[in-house]
Image (tube, grey):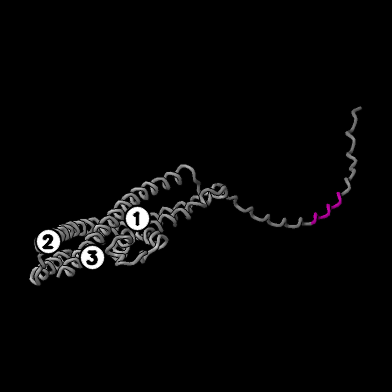
Amino acid sequence: MIDALKTLQKDAWRTSSARYNAARRLRRREIFATVSLAFMSALTVAMAYLQKVYATSAMPADNYLSTISAALGVFLLTVSLVEWGTRTGAVAEALHGNAEKLNGFWRRVALSLAASASSTPPAIPTLQDVEKFQLEYDTLKADCPHNHLPIDDLFFRAGHRFSPEFLNGRPAPLMNAFESGIVWCRWQISSIWYIAGIWLLLAALLVPLFGETMWTARTAPTAPTAPTAPTAPTAPTAPTAPTALIDSPSAPQGK
């Protein structure tokens, strides 16, 4: 019966720690999402100001800034809807509260084991005692409608890989330092991976704005000159008629 209580104590310790990790992971995601929404909103205003002041309709940057502004609007809407639907803050609060209750249960089991071991002669817990603790553990665990992810439990085991509860008499832990580091990285990224991906995509979209060609006005192509119509030949000049010489009669002279 003592071994059953020790197993139950280990399960409560492991579950409460995993739910503590889940609550921390979700709180980090909530903070990261809130900060990202604020910076994306500021970036949208900055793009509109940049387009209004520095970009003209003849520059490629004008249409490109309009594209980035539209993309920022889509990203803002996506992150807002996802975070509103998942209720990250409320889930983190529920998991943390349940972890506190399980931690209290773990302490009660530890006190019961210590009391049994300190009595003379050592008292052995009865089957009713074990069943009572088991029922309380199951009730506390089911009291939270949310559960932690496997990565939260794996992160806990990676941090306690040298604990006697996980060594089980082995000289070396099942997880080495390299595997523990990979678990640590996975746990850190698991809460912010999709928002980090959005930021990487935005950074890639902003890179072309630093090119000189974006801010160079495009020259309108010159229209081809229409061919000149051939000049009509000049008509020959008609010959001038000879001037007739008419002798006007002399006025009679008076006598």
For mark 2, give the secondary structure.
helix
Choose between 55 and 228: the one closer to the eye.
Answer: 55
Residue type at tag 2: Ser
**Magenta stretch encompasses residue 70:** no
For the magenta stretch, what is the residue range? 233-240
- Give the labeled residue for mark 3: 147
Q: Is residue 101 visible?
A: no
Tell me if 137 is positioned left or right of 175 in this view: left
Of the two numbered discs 1 and 3 in the rendering, the one whose residue sits closer to the viewer: 3
Q: Looking at the image, is mark 2 or mark 3 earlier in the sequence?
A: 2
The span from disc 2 to disc 1 (Cα, nearest Å) is 53 Å
- Give the labeled residue for mark 1: 76
Say if mark 1 contacts mark 3, CB within 8 Å. no
x and y percentages locating residue 96 in the rendered image: 21, 56
Q: Residues within 10 Å of mark 3 (few under 14, many from 20)?
A: some
Residue type at tag 3: Asn
Report the quarter where the N terminus lies: bottom left
Of the two numbered discs 2 and 1 in the rendering, the one whose residue sits closer to the viewer: 2
Choose between 16 and 232: the one closer to the eye.
Answer: 16
The span from disc 2 to disc 3 (Cα, nearest Å) is 27 Å
Residue type at tag 1: Leu
x and y percentages locating residue 67 in the rendered image: 45, 55
Q: Residue at x 18, y 67 (%)?
A: 8
Tell me if 146 is positioned left or right of 118 in this view: right
- Give the labeled residue for mark 2: 112
Choose between 146 and 12: the one closer to the eye.
Answer: 12
**Magenta stretch encompasses residue 236:** yes
Say if mark 2 contacts mark 1, CB within 8 Å. no
x and y percentages locating residue 57 in the rendered image: 50, 49
Q: Secondary structure of the magenta portion, mostly?
A: loop
